[in-house]
Image: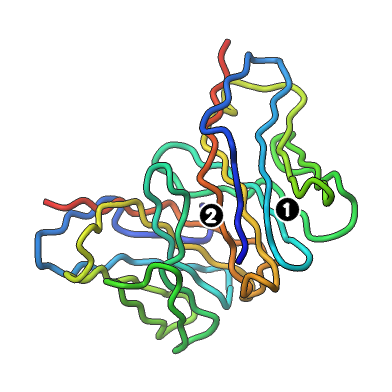
């Protein structure tokens, strides 16, 4: 988990509410990623970013949004359009976008719906 | 499209015995293969990877994995299991054919008993 921080550890969302998950890295990595983890389904890619002010949709981007205004920060917003947001969210970073590069993960944020 | 299969949801091993966690993959072109470990409510920790070269890859905590191109497999092994190895293990594959993204398996729960 070293080098990547995520906050909060637990987050509760009310119906119709947007919530933002924080991800910060001090590894000087260019690429950053957001994954969603559900039991028995492994990790699914939500969004990824290769460079500041640029990001791409992953496999399950609907109901989510991101920004990349600084190299070290890649916040994820779970919008009210995401109807099943309860999951464990993981942020990762790598030196660059090549799949040869190792991705390093943060400790995760667990999102629960009230 | 690229994919990963971890055929066993759970593997049980006695402490001191060798362990194997299985992974098979499908990808266009040369594969980049990774193993990660996850402890409860934590992020993923990198164990080892295969990019090119020697088919036997050694990683953290005494783990190793063997790349077998003909069987499209990348099984994780350890000669002598410890109770502290009990965790969720993920195999992942990447490659140019997969758009430089990683695809993760669904995970294998390893339980090491005294």
Q: Give the vertical position of A74 relative to A53 (above or below).
A: above
Q: Please name the residue that numbered disc 1 is placed on.
A: B49
Specify few, some or many for label 1: CA neighbours under 10 Å numbering under 14, 14-19, or 20 or more: many
SS for dot 2: loop
Q: Nearer the viewer, residue A84 or A18?
A: A84
Residue A30, labelled with which disc? none
Q: Please name the residue that numbered disc 2 is placed on.
A: A2
At 57% from the left and 59% from the top, the residue drawn is: B103
At 37% from the left and 48% from the top, the residue drawn is: A38
* Residue B114: quadrant of the picture: top right
Q: Give the vertical position of A52 relative to A109 (above or below).
A: below
Position of A69 compared to A8: left or right?
right
Q: Position of residue A54 (x, y in %)?
A: 47, 87
Q: Position of residue B30 (x, y in %)?
A: 78, 65
Position of B58 compared to A76: left or right?
right
Q: Position of residue B65 (x, y in %)?
A: 76, 41
Q: Position of residue B86 (x, y in %)?
A: 54, 27
SS for dot 1: strand
Position of B7 compared to A37: left or right?
right
Chain bearing mark 2 = A
């Amino acid at each position: 988990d070293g080098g990547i921080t995520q906050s909060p550890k637990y987050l509760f969302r009310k119906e119709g509410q947007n919530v933002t998950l924080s991800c910060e890295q001090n590894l000087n990595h260019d690429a950053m990623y957001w994954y969603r983890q559900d039991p028995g389904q492994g990790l699914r890619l939500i969004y990824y970013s290769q460079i500041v002010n640029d990001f791409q949709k992953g496999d399950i981007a609907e109901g989510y949004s991101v920004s990349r205004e600084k190299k070290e920060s890649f916040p994820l917003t779970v919008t009210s359009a995401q109807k099943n947001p309860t999951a464990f969210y993981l942020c990762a970073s790598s030196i660059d976008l090549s799949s040869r590069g190792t991705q390093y993960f943060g400790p995760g944020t667990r999102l629960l719906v009230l | 499209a690229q994919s990963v299969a971890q055929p066993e949801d759970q593997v049980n091993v006695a402490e001191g015995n060798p362990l194997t966690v299985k992974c098979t993959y499908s990808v266009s072109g040369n594969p980049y293969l990774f193993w990660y470990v996850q402890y409860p409510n934590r992020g993923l920790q990198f164990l080892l990877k295969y990019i090119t070269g020697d088919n036997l890859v050694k990683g953290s905590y005494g783990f190793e994995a063997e790349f077998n191109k003909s069987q499209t497999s990348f099984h994780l092994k350890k000669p002598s299991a410890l109770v502290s190895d009990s965790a969720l293990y993920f195999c992942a594959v990447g490659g140019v054919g997969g758009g430089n993204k990683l695809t993760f398996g669904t995970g294998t729960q390893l339980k090491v008993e005294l």
